[in-house]
Amino acid sequence: MQHASWSRVDKLNKEELTDRVRADFELDWTKSNHREIVGMALAQKYNDFHYLLHCKYLEYETHEAAICGGTKIVNKTVWECLCERWASENFKNLSRRNKSNRKSQKINLTGGRKSFVRLMEEKREQAPNYVAFYKEVHCSTRNGKFITEAAEHNYNMMLERMNEMEPEDNTDDNANAVFKEVLGTRSGYVRGLGHLVLPEPSQSLLSNREFERLREENEKNKAEAEGFKKKFETFMIDLEKMKACFSECDKLHERVSQLESQRESQRETSRDA
């Protein structure tokens, strides 16, 4: 936990945590989206835990008090390492920039630090599609109004697109399509749904994934073919040994037959004499 972010965690620890997740959930590890979502979820949880630790650090009046007070959540060595990082000018400057960036955001939501996946699950009954969900998480629970003008503008654009449809086309699937059309997508996620909701892959991405799938399948086939080749070579060596053995047996049998013929001839010669 002493690393600043998940990306800096060493490969061995990442693999250990990933294996724990795979042991607890049914995942198809041959699918890239399963691998991606596990990696993203672990990164999010890592950052969330760091946030909780930093909040604990801020409860102390001074840096020295935090070092002495510690926490039961992590061991003393990790805690001291994190405290030194939080007290550094680099971290303070980064925090100020992040705070300024959050203030400048045109669209905020009402869910706090809850992930979009968790919010979607909690609001599944009230919000059966993405358009309804967008309103749920961008409206104030106190007065029912949108918390930013930009969010209200986006929602109104979605409603306009929905109103242009025929009544029988006003389905949840079409509402989801309108949501994505209005907000668009960014690399790796759908705008408005956070990083843990993966978008439908583009045609070029599908082509790349198909190429990657075929490449992996080809490598697998090559490995299997190499295995069969080795088995066949071993079989041919064993077969040659067996042929040599049979040849020796034939020679031995022929030799025995010759000896028996000679012995029989000697008996007949003895009787004639």
Image (spheres, grey):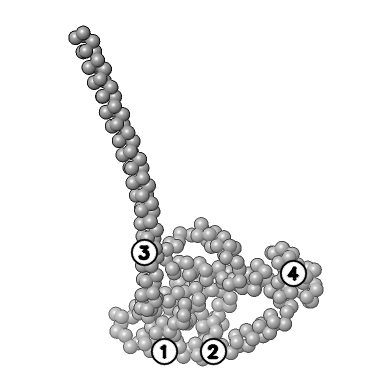
Occupied quadrant, residue 266: top left
Amino acid type indicated by mark 3: Asn
Q: Going 43% across and 89% down the picture, which residue do you hit? A: 156
Residue 80: assigned label: 4
Within 10 Å of disc 1 (Cα), the crowding (few <14, some 14-19, many 20+) is some
- On screen, residue 178 above or below 235: below
Q: Going 31% across and 85% down the picture, which residue do you hit? A: 165
Occupied quadrant, residue 141: bottom right
Amino acid type indicated by mark 4: Glu
Residue at the left extreme of this rendering: 272
Query: Which numbered disc flags the more N-terminal residue, 1 or 2?
Result: 2
The Cα atoms of the two marked residues, 1 and 3, are separated by 47 Å
Please identify the quadrant where the N terminus is shown: bottom right
- 129 vs 266, left or right, is right
Within 10 Å of disc 4 (Cα), the crowding (few <14, some 14-19, many 20+) is some
Residue 163: horizontal and vertical position, in percent? 35, 87
Q: Nearer the viewer, mark 2 or mark 4?
A: 4
The Cα atoms of the two marked residues, 2 and 3, are separated by 48 Å
Occupied quadrant, residue 182: bottom left
Report the front residue among 165 and 220: 220
Q: Nearer the viewer, mark 1 or mark 4?
A: 4
Residue for badge 1: 157
Residue 218: assigned label: 3
Q: Secondary structure at mark 4?
A: helix
